[in-house]
Amino acid sequence: MDGKITCSTANATILACKKIVQSFNENIYELALVRTDWTPAYAAELKGRINTALADYLPSESFCRHAERQHYVHELMISALKRVSILRALIKVDFKEDKKFQKYLFEELGYNDYFSDAKNGDYHSLYFLLEMLHKNMSSELSDLLTSKSIPLALIQNLMDFDNQLHEFKGCFDLINSSDHLTEEGKRVINAIFSEIKDICRVATAYYLFDPVKRDQFCFFRVMIGLKKTIPQAN
């Protein structure tokens, strides 16, 4: 079928969605208490919809062929998320007496716009957060941050992440990449992705004190789990 996705990261996102939908179905009777529109019928319909999308738009043989590159991207993004989270925590500690400046930093470095979605597994948001960090981290701002307890190496590492991730920018542009998907394919895949992100946001809050189930609705954790089921590149 024309319009199949060729980007391995996009493929992995869809496979992660499938895994999350499976967990959603398995826990639907409990999760139905959280939202009135989360019913067994809705869960079954969503599962059927994503299976149809997978059949129509996912070239599994291409995904397996590029598994090594795929694993590299995932590990890169997971490491980046860890470091942007550490930088945010350090800013909150070191500048806790200056809330106005702290607010300025989070706005300037992209945390206000992208961190919430990034920590919940949105690859696009993490990419844009790194891009904004790279764009607005001037030498003056870096000097100001490191004048406290923030290591210069942490900031430099985040700058390196952004440079590496530019190689994979096309993998995060599902909406604008007509070379990878037909218009109908883009609409279907992005609608599913958006819907599952919303499910993850609510489900991770519900399972806050149940780390096993919480991880079942975290994109990054699910991505890591996918590595165990994907053939390794030769």
Image (cartoon, helix red, strand yellow):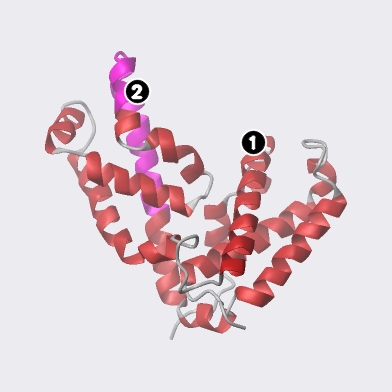
Quarter in which the N terminus is drawn: bottom right
Q: What is the C-alpha distance between the residues marked 2 and 1?
A: 24 Å
**Rendered location of residue 10, percent (x, y):** 51, 66
Q: Is residue 95 magenta?
A: yes
Relative horizontal placement of residue 183, taking residue 22 as reference (left or right) = left
Q: Is the magenta stretch mostly helix, strand or loop?
A: helix
From the image, tell me which residue sits under label 1: 205
What kind of residue is marked 2?
A: Lys
Does residue 99 appear left or right of residue 198 in this picture? left
On the image, the x and y values in percent for residue 34 come to 77, 36
Determine the secondary structure under disc 1. Answer: helix
What residue type is disc 1 on?
Ala
Q: Magenta part of the protein: which range?
A: 78-104
Among the two numbered marks 2 and 1 on one chain, the one whose residue lies closer to the N terminus: 2
Residue 143 shows up from this direction = yes
In which quadrant of the rendered view does residue 192 lie? bottom right
* Residue 73 figure quarter: bottom left
On the question of residue 216 being in view, the answer is no
Residue under numbered circle 2 = 103
Q: Per the image, is 123 magenta? A: no
* Residue 197 screen position, x and y as percent: 60, 48
Q: In the figure, 103 relative to 50: above or below?
A: above
Q: Residue furthest top?
A: 97
Looking at the picture, tell me which residue is in the foreground, 139 or 90.
139
Q: Position of residue 177 (x, y in %)?
A: 45, 66
Disc 2 vs disc 1: which is toward the camera? Answer: 2
| Crowd rating for badge 2 (residues with CA inside 10 Å; few <14, some 14–19, many 20+) | some
Quadrant location, the C terminus = bottom left
Left or right for 19, reference 92 = right
The reply to whether callout 2 and callout 1 are in contact (CB within 8 Å) is no
